[in-house]
Image (cartoon, grey):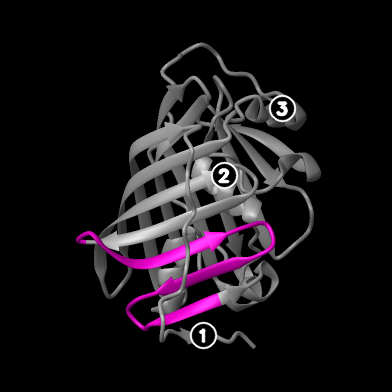
Amino acid sequence: MKKYLMLLLLVFIVSCKSKSGAVQGNNNNNKEEVNLISANKIIDGHYNNKLQFSTLYIKANVRYSDDKQNQNVTAEIKIKKDEQILVSIRFLGITMAKALITPNSVSYYEKINSSYYDGDFSSLSKWLGTDLDFNKVQNLLIGEAIDDLKKGKYTETLIDRLYRLDESKESDIKKSFFFEADKFLLEKEQISQTSKNIMMQIGYADNKSFDQGILPTSIAIEATQPKGKTEINLNYSTITFNEELSFPYSVPNGYKKIIIK
């Protein structure tokens, strides 16, 4: 349970990856012919959509489900771009968990087990079984590819009017990114690790335009592994940019520290 609460806090995935499947995304109703273009042009088009902001405040309704439970909570997400992210999880108005994430540290506590973690991404990534860092979490929340696509090599294909990029390097971990053909907005990304039979898919939908750029307001995360399937759905209900935000975080007295070996 601790890992899944952490997953909810970081809005990321406990294993490595999630299930391929139909996810409603940014439907492109333009019926003009779509021609295949180079991976570099697709990547450049995607990064032309970068949000321009200093701070971002999000209030979201979150639904979490696995093979044993379903849970509806609210999440308050505060982002100071490239510097820190504060995530608060509440149930019936009560704060059940909180996480403060910076490029160099990760701290969180959760009320159910009265426990907390304070460390960095290297040990946390090893514990969760997936490579995790600040940029991946920030990118996931704002609808940008979790990886820096300009640092990799990809093969391009055109599938159902979506541009698909598949990572070219030989690896047990396979990554694919899907973009709509109009503005190269990310529709979904899939990551799989066949040796461990685990998969993850992140789908984006309900894009809204702001002065700062375009932001998806619905994120669907599906993760499958031998132990079962996990789904997290975030629906952004309140969004504001460039307000003065505070990032208060302190572990309640008496909580037990989680030691990752």
Between 15 and 113, which is closer to the camera in this rendering? Answer: 113
| Residue underneath mark 3 | 44
Q: Nearer the viewer, mark 3 or mark 1?
A: 1
Q: Residue furthest top?
A: 32
Mark 1 to mark 2 CA distance (whole Å): 27 Å
Between 242 and 11, which is closer to the camera in this rendering? Answer: 242
Badge 3: residue crowd in 10 Å (few <14, some 14–19, many ≥20): few
Numbered range of the magenta stretch: 92-117
Numbered label attached to residue 257: 1
Q: Quadrant of the C terminus?
A: bottom right
Q: What's the residue type where badge 1 is placed?
A: Lys
**Sequence order check, earlier mark of 3 and 1:** 3
Q: Are marks 2 and 3 in contact (CB under 8 Å)?
A: no
Residue placed at 23% from the left, 59% from the top?
93
Between 243 and 156, which is closer to the camera in this rendering? Answer: 243
Numbered label attached to residue 80: 2
Q: Position of residue 26 (x, y in %)?
A: 43, 30
Mark 3 to mark 1 CA distance (whole Å): 43 Å
Mark 2 to mark 3 CA distance (whole Å): 24 Å
**SS of the residue under disc 3:** helix
Residue placed at 58% from the left, 27% from the top?
184
Residue placed at 58% from the left, 18% from the top?
34
Q: Position of residue 250 (x, y in %)?
A: 47, 69
From the viewer's perspective, tell me whether residue 180 is left or right of residue 227: right
**Sequence order check, earlier mark of 1 and 2:** 2
* Vertical relation: 141 (above or below) 104: above
